[in-house]
Amino acid sequence: MAAARRFRLVDRLVVHEGPIQFSALAERMISARTRYLVLDLDRTLHLGRNMGELLGWELTALRAFGLDELARMEPERHTGRLLFDPSRLGGSLRYLWHGSAAWTKPGLHYFACGKLPAKSDWLRAWTYRRFGPEPVRTVQRIPQDTLFGLMAGVPAATLRLLAERVWDRHEPDQVITREDLAALRERCPGLEVVITSASPRVVVEVACARLGADHAEGSEPGRINSGPEKIARLSARFPDALRPGVETVGITDTGYGEDHCWADHFTRVGDVNSDAPFSPFVDARSPIDSVHSALLLTRLEQRRRDAGRAGWLDPRRSEPARAERRVLSATDLSHQLAHFAAELEPLERDPIANAWPIARLARDARRALCDERTRGTLARARGLTATP
C-alpha cells in the first residue's frame, strides 16, 4: 500500500485583480459564518512598513532629541525610519550616532542572513543548513533582541506614546482601516478580530486600539511571537479557533514565508502585498478551502486615484498590477503543477531534512502560476484604474 501523501494541492486558488480595496477582498473571502479573522501586522496593515522596526528607530530618536523636542517636531515629520533635521543639527547627529551604534551589527546580520538569501537560492540553502528548518525565525532574533534592549528602562507610557505616534504618522500607508473592520462586523456579527505579530506587544496593542480589533498578540523579551508560535498562542487563547467546522480566516503579507504555516490550520488564507505568497501545496490534513492573493490599496493611493491624479500608485510597489481576477480549481492546479507534485513526493519522506528543497519547490510552483496569471507590466500598472 502506498504511503499517504503529506501534501495536497489547495482546492481553490484565487489571484485577485488590482490593487483593490480591502473591503472588496473581505467581501470575497470572509463569509458571514467567519468566527475569527486573524491579521498579521507588519507590512500587512500598511504597505511596506514594519511597525516594530519603526518603534526601534523612534527610540533612537527619543535618546537623541528627548520626548519634549520630539513632540514639537511631530507635525513636520514624514513616513519612514530615518530622521534628519538640519535646523536641529546636534540632535540629528546624535540620532545618526546612536542609530548606527544600536543597529549596524544587527542590521548587517539581518541583511546578510535574511534579505540577501531572499534574492539568492545558494545563500538561502546555506541559511537552512546553518539555522535549521526555520531560518527566518532564527535570523530575526538578533534585531528583535536589540529592539527589546532599547525598550528596557523606557516607561510603559512613553513606549505607548511613541508607538501611537508611529502608527498615526503612517496613516497614508494603511491598507486596512477601522472603518473596514466596522463594516465587516455589520456583515459578520459573530466575528472576533485578532492581530498577531512578531512586533512587541505594545505595538500590537496600539494597532488593536486604532483599528478597533478585539485581541492583540505580540512578542515579549525571550518569547518571540512568530511562525508556529502564532498558531500555538491562537490555539491556547481560543481553543475553538482550529476546531473542525469553525471558520477562521487569516490575512498576512507572509514576509519571507513566516506565516506560510497558517495555510495548514485555517479555513481560508490571503496574502496581501506579498513578495512571498502562499504556496498552492498545503498539508494534506489542512481544513483550508482556498488561498487568496491580493494587492491592497493604501489610503494615500485611494485619495490620489479619487482625485484623478496620474501615477497614483505608490512608487515602492514592484509587483505588476493584475488586470483580471483568476480562479484556479484543484483540477486546474493539478494539470498545471503535475511535474511539481511529482518532484515533491520523494521529498515528503523527510520534510525536516528536505525543508529547503520543499520550500524552493513550493515557491517555484507559485511563481509558475503567477507567470501564467499575471497580466501587464509595472509600467502599465502606473496608469491602471483599479477596481474599487
Image (cartoon, grey):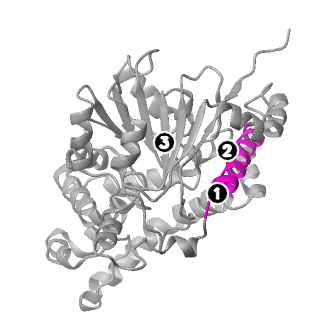
Q: Nearer the viewer, mark 1 or mark 3?
A: 3
| Label 1 Cα crowd, 10 Å radius (few <14 / some 14-19 / many 20+) | many
Residue at 50% x, 54% y: name it. 17
Q: Earlier in the sequence, mark 3 or mark 2?
A: 2
Q: Secondary structure at mark 2?
A: helix
Residue 13 seen in the figure: yes
Tell me residue 297's x, y (percent).
39, 60
How many numbered discs sit on the rendered protein? 3
Rendered image: mark on residue 270: 3
**Front residue (pair 213, 292):** 292
Tell me residue 201's x, y (percent).
31, 43
Q: Secondary structure at mark 1?
A: helix
Q: Amino acid at mark 3?
A: Gly
Residue at 73% x, 49% y: name it. 364
Badge 2 vs badge 1, beta-carbon distance below 8 Å: yes
Tell me residue 355's x, y (percent).
73, 37
**Front residue (pair 315, 49):** 315
From this view, report whether residue 91 is shown above or below residue 66.
below
Residue 220 seen in the figure: no
Q: Which of the image's four quarters has the C terminus?
A: bottom left
**Front residue (pair 278, 19):** 19
Asked which quadrant contains residue 161, the reply is bottom left
Q: Nearer the viewer, mark 3 or mark 2?
A: 3
Q: Amino acid at mark 2?
A: Phe
User: Does 369 sit left or right of 66 as displayed?
Assistant: right
| Label 2 Cα crowd, 10 Å radius (few <14 / some 14-19 / many 20+) | some
Give, as a single range, the part of the protein colored magenta. 355-375
Tell me residue 246's x, y (percent).
40, 19
* Residue holding disc 2: 131
